[in-house]
Image (tube, coloured by chain):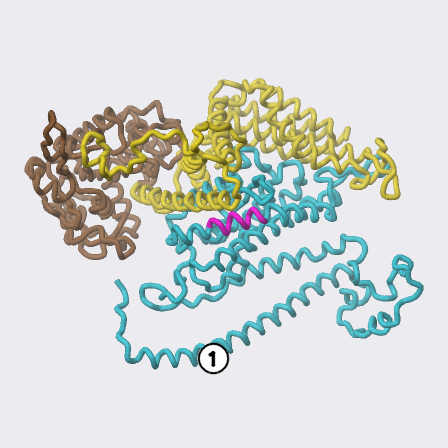
Amino acid sequence: MTVSSAEPRSASLLECRDLEYAYLGRFPALDRVSLTVERGESVALLGANGCGKSTLLKLLDGLLFPAAGSYRAFGTDVTEDHLEDDQFSRAFRGRVGFIFQNSDAQVFSPTVRDEVAFGPLNMGLEHAAAVARVDDTLAMLDITGLADRAPYQLSGGEKKRVAIASVLAMNPEVLLFDEPTAALDPRTQHWMVELIAELHDVGKTIVLATHDLEAVPLVADRCVVLGEDHRVARDGPTRAVLEDVTLLQSTNLVHAHAHLHAGATAPHAHAHDSGHH
Amino acid sequence: MGTDESATTATTRRLSPDWLLRDEIGLCPCGCVGKRRRGGFVEKTLSGVSGLVRGAMFSEDVAATPGLLQRIDARVKVVTLLGLLVVAAFLHSIAALATMYVVALVVASASRLSVRFFVARVWLFVPVFTGIVVLPATLNLVTPGTIVVPLGHWFGGPVGLTAEGLESAGLIVMRVAVSISLVVLLTLTTPWTRLLHALRSLRLPATVILVLAMAYRYLFHLLAAVEDMYTARRARTVVPDRDLRNGRRFVAASAGALFGKAYGLSEEVYLAMVARGFTGDVRLLAPDRVKRRDLAWCVACGGLGLVLLWGDRVLG
Amino acid sequence: MHIPDGYLSPETCAVMYGATAPFWVVAARRVRRVVKTRYVPLLALGAAYCFLVMMFNVPVPDGTTAHAVGAVLVAVLLGPWAAVIAVSVALAIQALFFGDGGVLAFGANCFNMAVVMPFVGYALYRAIAGRAFLTSPRRALAAGVGAYVGINAAALCAAIEFGLQPDLFYKTTATGGHVPLYAPFHLSQTIPAMLGAHLLVAGVVEFVLTVGVIAYLQRANLPILRINHPGLPDAAGQRVADDGRAVERRPRLRGIFIGLAGLVALVPLGLLASGGAFGEDSPSALDLRKYGLDAVPTGLQRYGDFWSSALFPGYDFEHGSHPNLGYYASAVLGTVLIAGVVVAGFRVAAVSRRRRDRRGGRDRDRADAGAEREPVGR
């Protein structure tokens, strides 16, 4: 599958229809989930832990394959068989980038430089071009000083930057983030949110899974809420979804929390993020 | 997720058990603090863990200082030092081996390695292991020959240290010392990652290099997990458990849990690799070009090797 | 058991590298073929795990602690071929980074701990565990026994590598004496020393750790055990695989054959030992004075020559003609004969079992005929 100007531009970049997936055939993760993502959009997947957000992202990256339903990306079906073909696989993997929640699993090479070079080299870039790409990406993310460090010498925030650099070096059109702000200190969280917003401005298509409701309005145009029944509870513009308190409570994204206000208790709903209670 | 920890609300007081809200000085009714006991397997494993980490950091530090060997290309170092290792294996005289050891000492000090550390690293190991193992071989009971240090008359014949036995012991001790010195010189002055890339010059396949690199990288990750498990155990140990069965069960359980973690991590890393286009063929960055001083070092090592071999044949 | 540099001659080191290299190549190919792209992270994490297992201090009965190798454990968990690579990589990191084990002796160390140990141990494990279900105690014990024998096999190999040095690599002094150039102890000393230490201590540690980990995983993390044991029922009486088909697995005898072949190859070492085995002398060769006798006892004389028509008298073609070749031929012939008897025995047992199953199956089918069919599949 090659990109050419004659390729009919289908309406949506990514199209999932009635996806079903269960781990080990027994533990359901997705129940007839449908999702479409347009080019240049930024979509947030919301839902409590275990509702299937990560699974959906992995399906979007062709790392898992649904038991039922279909997934089309860039106008072609994405199936296990199709990805066996080296040419299709290379094209697909080069156009979709995945930033994992666990940076330790994503930063596996001996040095930062090797890590960032892994993607471009696997895409078939010439050695000199790959080296140039690596230097540019390191500079863009401000981690040139870490180039020869080993992963165990990096802090959590630094590892996250390296993970992002390693994906951006392949210059994908679509970026998938799994809990990008989880386990990061406030300053790095802020940096991350700004980076995602910047990538969105540049024209990248972004899908991020998160339960950090504070960051969502800054990065996403649209929200898709997954309920604990592993189905799509709501799919709409960010503002509308975040104001739908009943929905957010029923899907366990916020809960009623009683505060002490000068002696009397006043129950109201709010969300928990990684920062405070 | 779980119970709210705000202590000001009446609801929480009902959820937490009473003893959690009280102060308690140890579980011992007499309130004693206790003395520090000599550690068992928990302490030993933990000190082993921290030893590994410290060793890694130490090597990184040494590899970063600007000494003679640090400036030489890793590939050249690997080839020359391995070559000298082979030469040492072929030397038959103690004098030649001793010469090589002295040269190693000189190079070590030129590479800003603390000579005291260098000597200790070799000689603390050698006497303990090699010396003790080899000592009985000096007796005529093991190595027959001319007795030079008689020890008496047992087993119906003269017993003593033989010249042949002593020479053999000397040879092996020197050889072990030289071998360790050469390997230490190589590994301390070369960052591990450069060392791995250099192994490619020995025609090791890229796959092996990547597996080695990844194993080393995740070694420290799993090490942290081991440390967590054992520190938690130590924190829970009020009195050292005399029951060895419990100790063995803990070691087995932690080793089993560790495999689960390792396997789970391998699955995640696999997904991360596939997501970046890995199809099974490993492609790595190529190292820099060889410089003039690297060639000079090559020549020097080659010369040393030849001189020693020739001297060995002539004198030995 | 890590052999440092300086104990083995470079010739021995080269031979050991040559012996191990084919295993590395085959292992790499097999693992890659079975797990495809997963092989890199799997082997890397397996190696890191191996390294750490070698670092654990295991409490032993006498109160101190000792280290295990864990090669058979990894073989049981990931398969023997993956174990070859995982243990080799762990040994490489130990040799290069921690100076534990030599660089020239790396081939020998890998042969002992990354080839002999996992294969011998795994073959024994499969033989003893058979088709026992996944959570059965027999499986854990089988792994432990495999580990015990495995490490002793490795120790034996190391002892042989050491013991051959003084007789093969020495220099002659002016007075005609021999100076051993490398390891100075002879086979008659290294074998009892190494085997003694490993039979009594290291083997026990290996057994304890392997049984412990397998038992733990049987309780706490069964899916991990399923990785290398597909198609085995979890508990007694359970059904196997989603499609209901019970998987018939033929026992993997290749490991046992390799072990036997190795032992046959080592047979000529017996020639190096002087003197005969105790109690095996024929009456004419008895040293009567040593036993305080004046003549050979009549009973011994009469029955000593009872069986005089041996095919290979004295383990040789004709007494004393070609000792080495005769010895070898005897070993091969003896192994083939014993193997033949054993295989025949198994065949007979299998035939009788099949006859029994067929009778039992017919009874079961009759009982099932009226019962409802259970839904099969997802």
What is chain C's hue in the picture?
cyan
**Above or below — where is A49 with respect to A165?**
below
Element type at marker 1? helix
Q: Nearer the viewer, residue C277 or C11?
A: C277
Lateral position of residue B153 relative to residue B213, left or right: right
Q: Residue at x 80, y 58 (%)?
A: C276
Q: Position of residue B102 (x, y in %)?
A: 66, 22
Residue B40 visible, this angle? yes
Q: Which chain is yellow?
A: B
Q: Image quadrant for the C terminus of chain A? A: top left
Q: Which residues are magenta?
A: C204-213
Q: Nearer the viewer, residue B249 or B36?
A: B36
Residue under label 1, please give it: C355
Residue B203 visible, this angle? no
Lateral position of residue A242 relative to residue A84, left or right: left
**Amino acid on which the number 1 mark rests in the picture:** Arg
Q: Residue at x 73, y 29 (%)?
A: B94
Q: Residue furthest front?
A: B30
Name the chief secondary structure element in magenta: helix
Q: Which chain is brown?
A: A
Q: Residue at x 14, y 37 (%)?
A: A42
